Amino acid sequence: MIYQRSSALFSEAQKVIPGGVNSPVRAFKAVGGDPVFVERAKGAYLYTEDGTTLIDYINSWGPMILGHAFDPVVKAVQEKAEKGTSFGMPTAIETEIASLAVSMVPGIEKIRFVNSGTEACMSAIRLARGYTGKDKIIKFAGCYHGHSDSFLIQAGSGAVTFGSPNSPGVTQGTAKDTLLADYNNLADVKRLIEANPGEIAAIILEPVAGNMGCIPPAEGFLEGLRQLCDDHNILLIFDEVMTGFRLAKGGVQELKGVTADIVTFGKVIGGGLPVGAFAANSKIMDYLAPVGPVYQAGTLSGNPLAMAAGLTMLTHLNTHSKVFLSLAEKTAYLHEGLAKVLTQHGVTHSINRLGSMISVHFAKDEVIDFKTAAAGNNDTFNKFFHGMLNEGIYIAPSAFESWFLTDALSYRDLDKTIDAVGQVAKVL
Ligand code: PMP
């Protein structure tokens, strides 16, 4: 057994950590078996505690666009650490990264940093409610916006993988303020708005979904939401925790030419350190304390190590914007290769891709929302996952996740991945 040491580490972990993991998606509960423990990573590769090397298609669930342990980021963090790791006082670097982010992302004038994507989305919703004076929000089935109470209603990602899209512990009072629509379905959104006149503060969505596999927005969907929000005095929130600074410098807003009222970020903006952020125009953002009445705070928010990593990452992306093109080309190459070998072996599949996000659903119909994603064959996916792991390729241990490419991947790595899919497809 190759992953003997990982299994031993997992046994120890389970004694003191619930389920042995600090975030459920890390466990192999859906696909079966014990999770692999990573010892270190560099570029496109993970080096496991068991001495194997894996080509990584998770990339910390998104942020490692430039590869693991990217030298400039490592150096920036080391230098900052020597000067102190947290002060709870303002630092100049916070303004530097805020200015850079504001210059890269369309439509935003001010940004506030937090410590995770969950915090960013939770705070964005509170701000939207405070600003509009309304309580209800619309979210989409299969979209994931972190684990705060309002969002654990038909949530995607680990919430659906582990069968608790509606988590116990969320009160009915909270749940009733979250209305649920089908992704890519404007009529459904209209129906909810009409049934709740004057009550909806915000519509929040992943403008390219990544938590039910990758699902791009249908033609006109984002534009239609923008129009509905304008017509009904509702704030449009783009959760760009996965897509921000990954699909383009300015995220999906730039890519699709649709502007949101509030945008949330995470992961990428911290260069792999624990950072999230939310941003909007000054009028909306000045509703936040200490200027405005909506309270939001954090001892470690704007932490110097996190800001140093994030600033280095964003600066690099800003000055090397060809990265986005190169990533999209690599992903298109992978898409073509995967489709070819799966078709050759007669495996029913449906592949979605946008920029550097891609996912393979073992479904016969096009995957456009949660229902069509859930129609995929999970048994086939589980076999596929373990087969790929045996071949040295690490994808997310759930059918309801996107793959995230890093620019550190070479075409040789991509060919190796396509060959591996060819091997695995034989037994699917
Ligand atoms: N929004 C989206 C779109 C996400 O994908 C995630 C996490 N995968 C979150 C919010 C929550 O971020 P975090 O895990 O950093 O709290």
Image (cartoon, grey):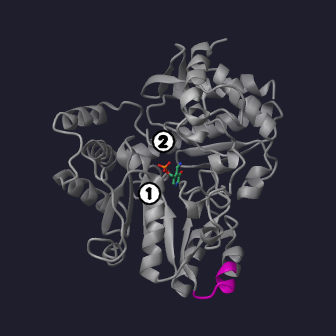
Identity of the amino acid at label 1? Glu
Image location (x, y in percent) of residue 257: 47, 67
Q: Secondary structure at mark 2?
A: helix
Left or right for 275, reference 172 = left
Q: Residue furthest front?
A: 15
The residue that disc 1 covers is 119
Residue ID at (35%, 32%): 70
- Work out whether residue 140 can be spotted: yes
Quickly name the residue at label 2: 327
Mark 2 surroundings: few (<14), some (14-19) or many (≥20) residues within 10 A = many
Is residue 134 highlighted in magenta?
no
Q: Residue at x 57, y 64 (%)?
A: 150
Question: Which image quarter is the C terminus in?
Answer: top right
Residue 222 location in percent, x, y?
A: 57, 69
Would you call the spot at circle 1 few (<14 residues within 10 Å), some (14-19), or many (20 or more)?
Answer: many
Q: In the image, is the residue at mark 1 within 8 Å of ligand 1 by its beta carbon?
A: yes
Front-most of 101 and 158?
158
Magenta extent: 192-198
Nearer-N-terminus badge (2/1):
1
Horizontal side of 410 relative to 422 (left or right) equals left
